[in-house]
Image (cartoon, helix red, strand yellow):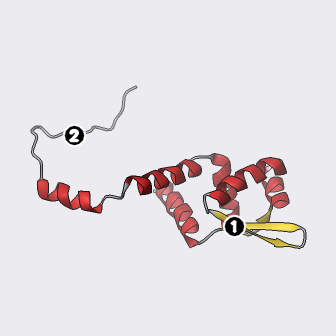
Amino acid sequence: MGSNIDVEICEQTIIHKDVVQKVSKAMSNDEDLENVADLFKIFGDRTRIRLLRALYQSEMCVCDMAYLLDMTQSAISHQLRILKQAKLVKNRKEGKVVYYSLADQHVMQILVQAYDHIKE
């Protein structure tokens, strides 16, 4: 389990109270931190990332996504339900067809940032 990343630690304990106080004031409350952690859990699923990536390209119906990803409509619907509850996707109905799209620009930005980061 060798790692080539060295972690440096302080050789003596000195608390920089001004820094700690400044950072403490800027820290989010526990509920916000929990919500962010939950959001990243949702992004932690390969199938959901594939769906978001597809919806980044175009609004799509469940049938199209199932065909594209070679999955059942039931499996796609289950994942879309999770994404919708997390406010990452939205839907609209046109006749008997339900179309899904990304909820807003923030979702696009998260995806773009993630892809930019892994490509560095």
- What's under tag 1, amino acid-wise? Lys
Quarter occupied by the N terminus: top left
> Residue shown at 57%/72% (left/top)?
105
Residue named by callout 2 = 8
Quarter occupied by the C terminus: bottom left
Circle on res. 20 = none
List x then y, in percent, for residue 112: 54, 64
Lower sequence index among marks 1 and 2: 2
Between residue 7 and residue 71, name the one nearer to us.
71
Alpha-carbon neighbours of circle 2 within 10 Å: few (<14), some, or many (≥20)?
few
Left or right side of 28 for 75: right
Q: Residue 23, located in which quarter of the rendered image?
A: bottom left
How far is mark 1 from mark 2, CA to CA?
A: 45 Å
Q: Specify the farthest residue to the right.
A: 96
Question: Where 5 sits versus 68, above or below?
Answer: above
List x then y, in percent, for residue 6: 28, 37
> Residue shown at 26%/39% (left/top)?
7
Residue named by callout 1 = 90
